[in-house]
Amino acid sequence: MIRSQSNPDIPSFESLFDLEEIQEIQDSFAAATRVASIITDAKGRPITTPSNFCRLCRDIIRKTEKGLFNCMQSDRIMGRYHEQGPVVQPCLSGGLWDAGVSIHVGGKHVANWLLGQVRTPDMDMEQMKQYAHTIGADPDEFAEALEEVKVMPLDQFKNIAKTLFLIVNRLSDQAFLAIDNARLFEGMKEELEKRIKLEEEQRRMEARLRQSQKMEAVGTLAGGIAHDFNNILFPIIGFSEMILEDLPEDSPLRESMKSVLSGAFRARDLVQQILMFSRETEQEVHPLKIQLILKEVLKLAKATLPSTIKIISHIPDKIGLVMADPTQVHQVAMNLITNAFHAMEETGGELRVGLSEIEVKKEDVHDLGIEPGFYVCLKIADTGSGMDEQTRKRIFEPYFTTKIRGKGTGLGLALVHGIVKKLEGEIGVKTEVGQGSEFSIYLPRIISTIEDPPVKAVGAMPASRNEHILVVDDEDAVLNMLDRSLSRMGCRVTCQNSSVKALELFKSNPKHFNLVITDLIMPDLTGDKLITGIKKIRPEIPVILCSGFNEIILNQKAPGTKPDKILMKPVTKNDLAEALVMLLGS
């Protein structure tokens, strides 16, 4: 047997060999040689059952504390590696002869095969009997058992030990060869797995590239929609704020106007949500009470769903907070409720919305796929058509939809899934064809006393101003609203729906204006080019760019001279007033 550098990767003796087969070999060897035999681990602990052990060793010496200690010390010494042959020596327990062969596989000491005990014909029996007093054994019983010990010439015992040495070496070589073959196979297996992983990674990268291209197209489309939609919302918000300012405090219309403003702000936030999804920008999250958003969503749902669909809700007030953006939560709830409606549109049914707190324990982690802890759980269930398993597996894929043309884009559940994951939550689905569907949203509950911020109230009328402002926009409704809003602040306003005429007007009298407000996308001359033209004439004049695009798209579309301030449409009266204070002073 070749001794190599110790290899910690070599497994234990029990893992290398069939213990039943080894026991059979050990028993046969003991019967053939008429000497005791046992295999222990490297520390001297038995692995096999002793074969042919004499009564003196088994029942007397090893039954005493000192005798057992001496036996184990002797076993460890005999198990030490010896390259030329076995270790043969008198046992520390009285002087009977023992032999030992260490079993090394790949240089690692995995076990000892021990032989004994025998006495030679010339052994001093009286000296042996004295050992009984040393270890505290019964002298008479010791003497009787000593007479039963196998008598064997020392040379014969050494030859038996050498035979065992050869057997052990062969076993070790076979075990090491098996390990080498296993390693070779494992190496081939790992190489194959690496190749498979590389191919899978390549497929995933190709899928991500296709997805990225899709999302790029969605982002471009969403940017255009956002621009047009925000231009529509801009005058709605502006005129609603002005009406709310003019209404007396006791007017019954104030609450209605606040609802109009709240809806307009929600629509504005939903546009930003679409842009966030398509461009993967981050939303601002803060401690939030989900129940407040759900009640608002259910009010809207009750007003729009047909009477054939019964809404059953259980939304307790005392539910903990989560870290989320209210628009995101609104989007999640609206998407799931809309899907439930489509599933029950033809037959009617029940829509169940529930909110609860749950504790996920360690034993539940595997089923839910989330970490242990406390969660707020939103469940939205319907009694509609349900889904088969193949459909359920694909529902979170972008652009996958089972709805007819005009009823869905395939982005709703993908958006829901993306929002939940970004909030470090999980979404579960239970569904069966003809039995309806249940979506469960788990969001981590937080410990906080911060309440969900109310809808931002319209501020007091800013101090009267006297600046002359040039406003440029190709939407007449936006021009009209900005004219009235700025005039109410005391400003003198000149409006132009043509950017070309606006630049000519500015050239004719550049000192006539204190500030310019312009849109970005306009025919003939875009807003960024208008800003460049104005700044060439009068570099110090402050310019505000109002746009319906988000800032990422805005930077792509307006690479020229930068404005002094960017306001994202739809702009509130307070945002406009703050911008004027920043650029012109109070």
Image (tube, helix red, strand yellow):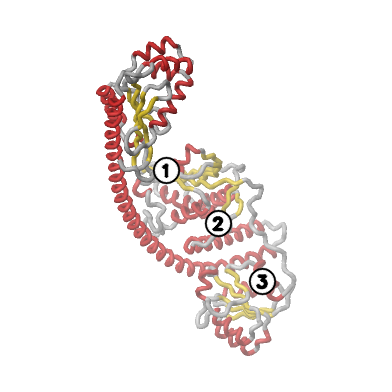
Closest to the observer, 448 or 72: 72
Amino acid type at mark 2: Thr
* 10 Å crowding of disc 3: few (<14), some (14-19), many (20+): some
Pick the residue in front: 467 or 64: 64
Q: Residue furthest top?
A: 140
Q: Earlier in the sequence, mark 2 or mark 1?
A: 2
* Location of residue 412 with respect to 146 vertically, above or below: below
Q: Which disc number belongs to residue 21?
A: none
| Three-letter residue code for mark 3 | Ala
Badge 1 is on which residue? Answer: 430
- Which residue matches tag 3? 579
- State whether residue 310 appears in this view: no
Dot 2 surroundings within 10 Å: few (below 14), some, or many (20 or more)?
Answer: many
Residue at 34% x, 17% y: name it.
Answer: 149
Q: Mark 3 or mark 1, which is nearer the start of the sequence?
A: 1
Q: Residue at x 48, y 60 (%)?
A: 277
Looking at the rendered structure, the kind of residue marked 1 is Lys
Q: Is residue 57 above or below residue 13?
A: above
Checking the image for residue 327, the label placed there is 2
Q: What residue appears at the point 59 percent right and 84 percent down from the top-left corner?
A: 502
Residue 319 visible in the picture: yes
Q: Which quadrant of the figure has residue 538?
A: bottom right
The residue depicted at 66 percent of the width and 47 percent of the height is 449
Report how far apart the C-alphas of labels 1 and 3 lie in the structure: 50 Å
Q: For the N terminus, which image quadrant?
A: top left
